[in-house]
Image: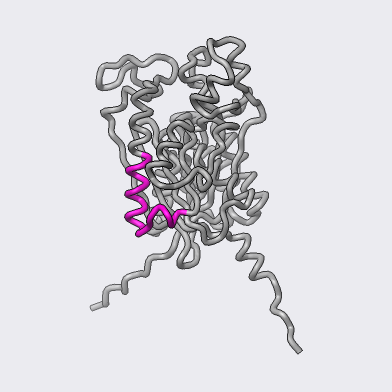
């Protein structure tokens, strides 16, 4: 009788490459002030946002996703070698099917790779990283391209002051694969509560939610309810993720929150005991880019070398569903390690 296989040791899995893209078209607060009852001072004081990017004709979520990957390849030219699965987090897919992930994979020449979308709104990137992590642990994939991409300007009423000023378009991309022990993902916490569905939604096939709420053509949002929910779950899920990883707030080198509103980020930081000086915030230039928010901020902080090899990162997001997600990881700077391996040993005489 054959003996059962010995248990396989769990590999360390983490992010090995990052990239991001935002459209060229800049929409400032003054652009809204010219036609809505608002002004730059009010928008900045209430949201922290000064400008955001909007897509132009012919730019959709798959296009932004591909360009984010192209940005990734500029710094990590071999990153896609061995990628056998593509996951895209998006609330604004090009089509219900084919998946936006499949469209991205095709444009990148990754034909044959598994491809599917994750729908968790602004929490989508954290959800997607957890899915990618699970695929690799299960042996269903060896290396995953994870993209967060949204074009919310297309589904937001640009004449509604309550939502128009908040949202922009953008995408981020990461490659997830095996990393050396001591690096990579340590914990994930995910959740959703559909009792808050009426507070944040985008219509697709149905004309109303199970509660009976009629949905219109554009995104619907109850700002007051979303604000209360957001601060609570940002704190609770972050604490839970840190607890699962055996971390305290003092262990966190960088917090990367969903870039929704500075009035949400600031109180969340205060309650977590993580200062803004250790928090990556770029919403003043991009606004809320939904699933593109966290990876866009991560890519920016990696590219400007704020996040360094071995540093502890906490990411957290919330969104429609109502959903939430948090995760911790230790950053693996693959370019630094590759450069170190490329340096020839010193010759001594």
Say if 96 sits above or below 304 in the image. Answer: above
Whether residue 244 appears in magenta in the rendering, the answer is yes
Q: Nearer the viewer, residue 221 or 11?
A: 221
Q: Quadrant of the N terminus?
A: bottom left
Part of the protein shown in magenta:
234-252
Residue 118 is inside the magenta segment: no
Left or right: 292 in relation to 9? right
- Quarter of the image for residue 61 reads top right
Residue 154 as seen in the image, left or right of residue 228: right
**Residue nearest the observer in this picture, 308 or 210:** 308
Magenta part, dominant SS: helix
Q: In the drawing, does residue 348 fall left or right of residue 98? A: right
> Which image quarter holds the C terminus?
bottom right
**Outermost residue toward the right?**
349
> Residue at position x 37%, y 50% from top?
188
Examine the image and state in which quarter residue 44 appears. Answer: top right
Q: Is residue 279 visible?
A: yes
List x then y, in percent, for residue 195.
26, 28
Residue found 34% across the figure and 16% down from its top = 207
Q: 27 above or below 113?
A: above
Residue 124: % across, % down: 43, 39
* Residue found farthest to the left: 1
Give x and y (percent) for residue 23: 63, 31
Measured as percent of width and height from the top left, residue 31 is found at: 62, 17
Q: How is the image coloured?
A: one colour
Q: Who is closer to the viewer here, 224 or 336? A: 224
């Amino acid at each position: 009788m054959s003996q059962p296989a010995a248990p396989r040791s769990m590999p360390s899995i983490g992010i090995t490459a990052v990239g991001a893209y935002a459209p060229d078209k800049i929409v400032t607060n003054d652009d809204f002030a010219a036609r809505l009852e608002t002004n730059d001072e009010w928008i900045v004081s209430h949201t922290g946002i000064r400008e955001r990017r909007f897509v132009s004709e012919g730019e959709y979520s798959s296009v932004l996703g591909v360009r984010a990957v192209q940005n990734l390849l500029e710094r990590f030219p071999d990153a896609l070698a061995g990628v056998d699965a593509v996951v895209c987090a998006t609330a604004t897919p090009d089509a219900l099917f084919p998946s936006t992930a499949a469209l991205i994979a095709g444009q990148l020449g990754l034909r044959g790779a598994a491809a599917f979308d994750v729908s968790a709104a602004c929490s989508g990137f954290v959800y997607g990283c957890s899915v990618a992590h699970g695929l690799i642990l299960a042996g269903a994939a060896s290396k995953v391209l994870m993209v967060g991409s949204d074009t919310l300007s297309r589904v937001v009423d640009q004449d509604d002051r309550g939502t128009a000023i908040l949202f922009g378009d953008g995408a981020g991309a990461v490659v997830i694969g095996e990393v050396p022990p001591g690096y990579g993902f340590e914990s994930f916490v995910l959740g959703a509560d559909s009792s808050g569905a009426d507070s944040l939604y985008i219509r697709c096939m149905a004309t109303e939610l199970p509660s009976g709420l009629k949905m219109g053509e554009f995104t619907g949002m109850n700002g007051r309810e979303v604000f209360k929910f957001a601060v609570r779950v940002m704190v609770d899920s972050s604490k839970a993720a840190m607890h699962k990883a055996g971390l305290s707030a003092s262990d966190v080198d960088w917090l990367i929150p969903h870039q929704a509103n500075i009035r949400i980020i600031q109180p969340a930081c205060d309650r977590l005991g993580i200062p803004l000086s250790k928090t990556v915030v770029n919403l003043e230039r991009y606004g809320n880019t939904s699933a593109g928010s966290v990876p866009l901020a991560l890519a920016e902080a990696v590219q400007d070398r704020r996040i360094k090899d071995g540093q502890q990162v906490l990411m957290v997001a919330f969104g429609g569903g109502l959903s939430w997600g948090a995760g911790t990881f230790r950053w693996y700077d693959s370019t630094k390690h590759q450069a170190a391996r490329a340096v020839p040993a010193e010759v001594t005489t």
